[in-house]
Structures are given as structure tokens and as C-alpha cells.
Amino acid sequence: MPNYRNCAGIVVFNDEGKVLMCARADMGGLNWQFPQGGINFKESITEAALRELTEETSIKSATVLLACEDPIYYVYPRRIHKALSKIGRGYVGQKMFWVLVHFYGDDSEINFDMPNPEFKAYEWVDVTRAYKRIVSFKRSPYRFACKLFEPYIEAYLNRDKCLVFNEEDIDLNADNEEQSALPNEA
């Protein structure tokens, strides 16, 4: 049976609904991806996601909104698998567990100035275009995550427009402290 690395993939979005793309520090040019990293033994998907997010970007002002517990797999290209095998990591690919995170901090919190940085640059991009920037062998799981989380991002950003009840159901002039916000049953 193939050996896949358990990995938390983190789709981070800001108050403008843009998602965080980071350029890998270990490659020339700008090779974009979402923050992601291995899930340690006895660590939950969300614990791993928040830990990796902080380790890779310094972000702490984040709230997990959703974790997809059904993994999406991808296989490494032969050259990457071969290189990883030489250093004792014989995984054929990754088993991605996607997590949606809202970043409520300021961009000044994002910092790659650390020993052995994972990333060297970042951009906020539209979720509908993010997966198109990913290296081809990871594109399918990234596309899945973007399409899965897009409506949740929109719903979260528009949450203040959601009505829980109608104003007509409440007597705003009532002096009775025990009045319920629910309509009276006839």
C-alpha cells in the first residue's frame, strides 16, 4: 500500500475575502502554494493547521471555521519522490486535510524572517483564481479546496446581513423584560 504523508492544507482568507498565497523560499522564482504541513502523531487536523500556520507565516490572529475530514490525495512527481526517498522520506505523495481559516489580524503580523523560512513572499488573491497558480501536480487538490471553501468564505463575510428573525415578530416598544424574540403562537 502506498505511503502518503498526512498533511493539513490551510486556506487562509482575510476580511476582503482574498486567500493567502505564499511563495516557497526553497525554489527560484515565485512558486505559490497555501501554507501546509504535516500532522503530528495525536495532533488533530485543526491543531496541525494552526501550528503550521504560525510556524510558516507567524500568523496567530486566526480562527478555524471549517475542517474537511475527508482527505484529498496527490502523488509527487517521480523526481520529488526520488529526492525525498534519499533523505528517508519515502512518501509517494500527500494525504491533504483542508482547513478554512479566517485571518482577522493586520498584514504586519505576516513574517517570514525566521531560521529556515518556508516562504519568501505572499499575496492575497481571489479564491476563484488561486488554484491556477499552483504547480500542476498539486492543482487538483487545491482546486477542490478552493471550490469547497468559496461559498463558506462568502457566507462568513456576509454573516451580518443574515437575519435570524424578522423585526415584525418583536414588539420593540414593549416594557415586559420577559418578552421573547419569537413570535407569539396563536
Image: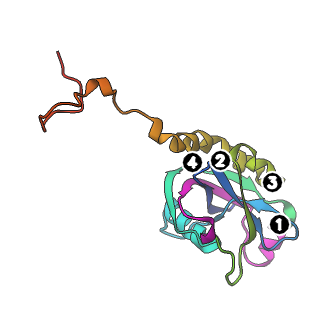
Q: Amino acid at mark 3?
A: Phe
Residue ID at (57%, 48%): 70
Q: Are marks 1 and 3 in contact (CB under 8 Å)?
A: no
Task: State the residue position of label 2.
Answer: 145
C-alpha separation, residue under disc 1 versus residue under disc 3: 11 Å
Residue 186 lies, with reference to residue 138, above or below; the image says: above
Lower position in the chain sequence, tag 4 or tag 2: 4
Which is closer to the viewer, label 4 or label 2? 2
Residue bearing mark 3: 137
How far across and how far down the image is residue 184, in percent? 19, 22
Q: Indicate the quadrant where residue 172 lies.
A: top left
Q: Earlier in the sequence, mark 1 or mark 2?
A: 1
* Of residues 18 and 84, the one drawn nearer to the viewer in this rendering: 18
Write the residue at 57% across / 41% down: 154
Write down the residue under mark 1.
80
Q: CA distance from mark 3 to mark 4?
A: 19 Å
Q: Tell me the crowding category of disc 2: few under 14, some 14 to 19, or many 20 or more residues within 10 angstroms, Cα based.
A: many
Q: Are the residues at dot 4 and dot 2 in contact (C-beta closer than 8 Å)? A: no
Q: Depth check: give the residue in front, 32 or 44.
A: 32
Q: Nearer the viewer, mark 1 or mark 2?
A: 2
Secondary element at image label 3 = helix
Mark 3 or mark 4, earlier in chain = 4
Residue type at mark 2: give it.
Ala
Q: Is disc 1 surrounded by few (<14), some (14 to 19) or many (20+) residues within 10 Å? A: few
Amino acid carrying mark 4 in the image: Asp
Give the mark nearer the N terminus: 1 vs 4.
Answer: 4
Residue 70: assigned label: 4
Which sits in the foreground, 26 or 121?
Answer: 121
In the rendered image of this protein, does residue 54 appear above or below residue 69? below
The residues bearing labels 3 and 2 have C-alpha atoms spaced at a distance of 15 Å
Give the distance between the C-alpha atoms of the residues marked 1 and 4, in whole angstroms: 25 Å
Tell me which segment is drawn in magenta.
Answer: 80-109
